[in-house]
Amino acid sequence: GEVEDDGSWRAAWTWLYVSGRPLLVLLLAMSVVNFSLSFFNLGLLVTATSVGGPARAGLALAVGGVAMIAGSLLLAQRGVSSHRIRTISRALLLVAFGTAIAASRPVFALVIVGVGIALGAVPAANAAMSTVFHERTPASMYGRVFGLRSTIGSALGPLGSVVAGFVIARLAGPALESGGSLSGSVGAVIGTGRERGAALILLGVAATLTVLALALRRSRTLAPLDAPVAESETESWLDPVRV
């Protein structure tokens, strides 16, 4: 039914839960992505340092930055596809693929290639996500809904970094040491030693983003967001808001 917007946060939450539920699902998905990327950032830095040495570690970050700029320029030229959810899903799969390459072996060239693929796809996911929220959020709720998005993104970054540091140092690293619980299985593929704990974390990020991307693509709740806006409005997927 209709949600009366009295300008309060409660009205915005009610709208997201009732009429704007697809956007609420996207907010939750974005939370998982942001938290995972915190693990990616720290895992990449540790992996690049351990594989390439301190003198070359910054090169991986530089390549990632250039890849993001290139991805943004390409996106500016081609525009965002009208299939927003499909775009987000494909971009996340590319991020996952690049992350897995960076973690696959203790070879610096693979780290460089992996980070280039992963970060080059990030602008497409960000643009599609932002476009969906601009298209589907009632103008009267822009401030509250976008404020919520910003809060989630800002809060989960530092929290994820703290947790990632603990997991790498206390869990993943020891698991890949000689005689560790994963040294004979995963370690046989990505390499062993405490320094490969960060690579194990990157593999976890790749797996998480892969599962999330596939879930978004198959979600019935999000399916209406892949339709052009005019068509969705005709089908009234979004209940009206009284202002």
Image (cartoon, rainbow, N blue to C red):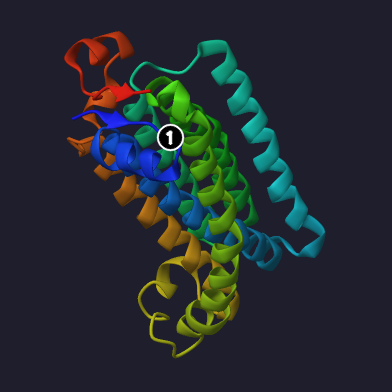
Q: Position of residue 220 (x, y in %)?
A: 17, 35
Residue under numbered circle 1 = 91
Q: Is mark 1 on a helix, strand or loop?
A: helix
**Could you tell me which quadrant the C terminus lies in?**
top left
Q: Position of residue 99 (x, y in %)?
A: 49, 51
Q: Quadrant of residue 51?
A: bottom right
- Horizontally, residue 56 falls left or right of residue 199, namely right
Q: Is residue 41 above or below residue 114?
A: below
Q: Where is residue 211 in the image (x, y as percent from the top left)?
A: 30, 50
For this orientation, the residue located farthest to the bottom is 179
In this rendered view, identify the residue nearer to me: 51 or 217: 217
Q: In this view, does 140 lie above or below 111?
A: above
- The kind of residue on which mark 1 rests is Ala
Query: Which residue is located at x 59 percent, y 40 percent?
Result: 116
Q: Quadrant of residue 157?
A: bottom right
- Horizontally, residue 223 falls left or right of residue 213, namely left
Query: Which residue is located at x 28 percent, y 43 percent?
Result: 17
Q: In this view, does 147 lie above or below 77?
A: below
In this rendered view, identify the residue nearer to me: 214 or 187: 214
Neighbour tally class for label 1: few under 14, some 14-19, many 20 plus, Cα within 10 Å: many
